[in-house]
Amino acid sequence: MAEPVRARRLTDAEGQRLQQIVRRGKGSTVRWRRALIIMASASGNTVPAIARLVAADEDTAREVVHAFNQKGLAALDPRWAGGRPRRITDDDIDYLVETATTRPEKLGRPFTHWRLRKLSAGLAENPVRVVRIGHERLRQLLREAGITFQRTRTWKESTDPDKDAKPDRIDAVLA
């Protein structure tokens, strides 16, 4: 039979901190329950009794005790990863960036430059590889990649054949 799970011997500072958390009962409920589990285990209670005391599963009580034995008081604040799983892989992001940097005409689209809605629709309707992505996430990914669809305007070159003569005419009128 396996040895019962018990919290290691508490230092004076740890015991005072745990008592402070349990007595005040303020703050996070998760932190309070974890502190109660550790105190109960350190005082010699069994895992089933602790689980009934805090209305938790026995496996949860064991996990908290093991975490405390390994990490100390850092076990009071679990580092849960939240949020939904990613729907877009890194390969999809690379493909998305590659598509965004390619002119739509080369991909058989009937327009000259991308917009967010056009790019999102084009990725979702692509027969080769379908990438479904919302406009906001697409905007964020493009911004991270340093891609903007705003056209850079420049006045360095003019297509006007009389461009050299115009400054002279303006100077003559002002003089």
Image: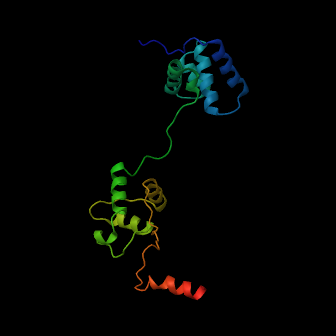
Residue 105 as seen in the image, left or right of residue 17: left
Question: Which residue is the extreme one toward the left?
Answer: 128
Residue beneath the point at 43% across and 46% down: 85
Q: Which quarter of the figure is the N terminus placed in?
A: top left
Query: Can you give x and y, in whole percent of width and height, for residue 171 in the image?
Result: 55, 83
Q: Up-down: is 168 above or below 54?
A: below
Image coordinates of residue 122 in percent, x first then y, are 36, 67
- Which quarter of the image is occupied by the C terminus? bottom right
Closer to us: 171 or 60? 171
Judging depth in this view, the residue of 155 and 113 nearest the camera is 155
Task: Give the camera-side residue of 31 and 74.
Answer: 74
Q: Position of residue 134 (x, y in %)?
A: 45, 60
How are the colours assigned in the image? rainbow
- In percent of width and height, residue 69 lies at 52, 18
Vertical position of residue 152 compared to residue 159: above or below: above
How many marks are shown on the rendered structure? 0
Residue under the image location 70 percent in, 29 percent down = 25
Q: Residue at x 62, y 24 (%)?
A: 35
Dividing the picture into quadrants, the one containing residue 160 is bottom left
Q: Quarter of the image holding residue 131?
A: bottom left
